[in-house]
Image: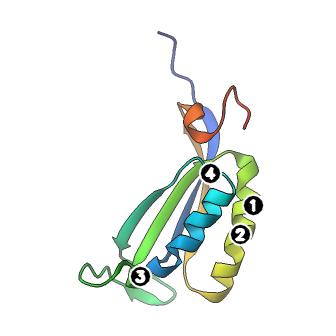
Amino acid sequence: MGSLSLHPMKEIRVIVAGEHRPFVTELLDRVHASGYTIIGNISGKGHHGVREAHFMFSEQESLEMILTVVPEDKVEPILAGLRPIFERYSGFMYVADVAVSRQEYFGMKGGKP
Protein backbone atom coordinates (compact mmCIF):
# COMPACT_ATOMS: atom_id res chain seq x y z
CA MET A 1 0.00 0.00 0.00
CA GLY A 2 1.35 3.43 -0.94
CA SER A 3 1.81 6.37 1.36
CA LEU A 4 -1.06 8.71 2.10
CA SER A 5 -0.89 12.01 0.21
CA LEU A 6 -2.66 15.26 0.98
CA HIS A 7 -4.14 17.57 -1.65
CA PRO A 8 -4.96 21.28 -1.10
CA MET A 9 -8.63 22.27 -1.20
CA LYS A 10 -10.88 24.99 0.23
CA GLU A 11 -13.46 24.51 2.96
CA ILE A 12 -16.45 26.83 2.92
CA ARG A 13 -18.69 27.10 5.99
CA VAL A 14 -21.94 29.01 5.75
CA ILE A 15 -24.09 29.87 8.79
CA VAL A 16 -27.62 30.98 7.89
CA ALA A 17 -31.17 30.79 9.20
CA GLY A 18 -32.68 27.41 8.38
CA GLU A 19 -35.11 29.01 5.94
CA HIS A 20 -32.12 29.88 3.70
CA ARG A 21 -30.66 26.36 3.62
CA PRO A 22 -32.33 25.51 0.27
CA PHE A 23 -30.78 28.63 -1.31
CA VAL A 24 -27.30 27.57 -0.19
CA THR A 25 -27.64 23.88 -1.07
CA GLU A 26 -29.11 24.64 -4.51
CA LEU A 27 -26.17 26.98 -5.17
CA LEU A 28 -23.70 24.26 -4.19
CA ASP A 29 -25.49 21.83 -6.50
CA ARG A 30 -25.38 24.35 -9.38
CA VAL A 31 -21.62 24.82 -9.06
CA HIS A 32 -21.18 21.04 -8.84
CA ALA A 33 -19.77 20.86 -5.33
CA SER A 34 -19.36 17.13 -4.84
CA GLY A 35 -21.21 17.25 -1.52
CA TYR A 36 -21.91 19.16 1.65
CA THR A 37 -22.69 18.59 5.31
CA ILE A 38 -25.52 20.30 7.17
CA ILE A 39 -25.41 20.76 10.92
CA GLY A 40 -28.74 22.00 12.23
CA ASN A 41 -30.03 23.66 15.35
CA ILE A 42 -26.83 25.49 16.20
CA SER A 43 -26.47 28.32 18.68
CA GLY A 44 -24.17 31.28 18.74
CA LYS A 45 -23.61 34.94 19.42
CA GLY A 46 -22.89 37.60 16.83
CA HIS A 47 -23.85 41.10 15.72
CA HIS A 48 -27.52 40.31 16.29
CA GLY A 49 -26.94 38.98 19.81
CA VAL A 50 -27.38 35.45 21.09
CA ARG A 51 -29.26 32.99 18.91
CA GLU A 52 -30.17 29.75 20.62
CA ALA A 53 -31.17 26.48 19.02
CA HIS A 54 -34.86 25.65 19.31
CA PHE A 55 -35.35 21.93 18.99
CA MET A 56 -39.10 22.25 19.52
CA PHE A 57 -39.65 24.59 16.60
CA SER A 58 -39.17 24.12 12.88
CA GLU A 59 -35.75 23.98 11.23
CA GLN A 60 -36.54 27.26 9.51
CA GLU A 61 -36.42 29.12 12.81
CA SER A 62 -32.95 27.86 13.81
CA LEU A 63 -29.44 28.49 12.56
CA GLU A 64 -27.80 25.93 10.33
CA MET A 65 -24.23 25.42 9.19
CA ILE A 66 -23.63 24.13 5.68
CA LEU A 67 -20.06 23.14 4.94
CA THR A 68 -18.41 21.92 1.79
CA VAL A 69 -14.90 21.22 0.54
CA VAL A 70 -14.18 22.26 -3.03
CA PRO A 71 -11.30 22.90 -5.43
CA GLU A 72 -10.12 26.52 -5.40
CA ASP A 73 -11.74 27.31 -8.78
CA LYS A 74 -15.22 26.81 -7.28
CA VAL A 75 -14.75 29.35 -4.47
CA GLU A 76 -15.47 32.52 -6.49
CA PRO A 77 -18.72 31.22 -8.04
CA ILE A 78 -19.92 30.18 -4.58
CA LEU A 79 -19.01 33.57 -3.07
CA ALA A 80 -20.81 35.38 -5.90
CA GLY A 81 -23.86 33.18 -5.43
CA LEU A 82 -24.00 33.82 -1.67
CA ARG A 83 -23.74 37.60 -2.02
CA PRO A 84 -27.52 38.19 -2.33
CA ILE A 85 -28.29 36.29 0.86
CA PHE A 86 -25.76 38.21 2.94
CA GLU A 87 -26.88 41.55 1.51
CA ARG A 88 -30.41 40.96 2.88
CA TYR A 89 -30.14 38.63 5.86
CA SER A 90 -27.94 37.88 8.83
CA GLY A 91 -25.44 35.06 8.63
CA PHE A 92 -21.82 34.62 7.68
CA MET A 93 -19.39 32.39 5.89
CA TYR A 94 -15.71 31.74 5.81
CA VAL A 95 -13.22 29.98 3.59
CA ALA A 96 -10.26 28.04 4.94
CA ASP A 97 -7.36 26.18 3.41
CA VAL A 98 -7.62 22.45 4.04
CA ALA A 99 -5.93 19.32 2.74
CA VAL A 100 -7.76 16.11 1.85
CA SER A 101 -6.41 12.62 1.47
CA ARG A 102 -8.99 11.33 -1.03
CA GLN A 103 -9.21 14.00 -3.70
CA GLU A 104 -11.48 11.85 -5.88
CA TYR A 105 -14.24 12.42 -3.29
CA PHE A 106 -14.14 16.14 -4.06
CA GLY A 107 -14.40 16.14 -7.82
CA MET A 108 -10.63 15.99 -8.36
CA LYS A 109 -9.12 13.15 -10.33
CA GLY A 110 -5.39 13.23 -10.85
CA GLY A 111 -5.26 16.74 -9.38
CA LYS A 112 -7.63 18.30 -11.94
CA PRO A 113 -11.33 19.17 -11.49
Give the mark nearer the N terminus: 1 vs 4. Answer: 4
Q: Amino acid at mark 1?
A: Pro
Badge 1 is on which residue? 77
- C-alpha separation, residue under disc 3 versus residue under disc 4: 23 Å
Q: Amino acid at mark 4?
A: Ala
- C-alpha separation, residue under disc 4 versus residue under disc 2: 13 Å
Are circles 4 and 2 on residues that touch, CB within 8 Å? Answer: no
Badge 2 is on which residue? 81
Are circles 3 and 2 on residues that touch, CB within 8 Å? Answer: no
Residue density around tag 4, few if under 14, some if 14–19, many if 20 or more, within 10 Å: some
Q: Where on the picture, by quarter, is residue 39?
A: bottom left
At 64% from the left edge and 39% from the top edge, which residue is drawn?
A: 107
Q: Toward the viewer: 4 or 21?
A: 21
Badge 3 is on which residue? 60
- C-alpha separation, residue under disc 3 versus residue under disc 2: 20 Å
Q: Where 51 sits versus 94, above or below?
A: below
Badge 4 is on which residue? 33
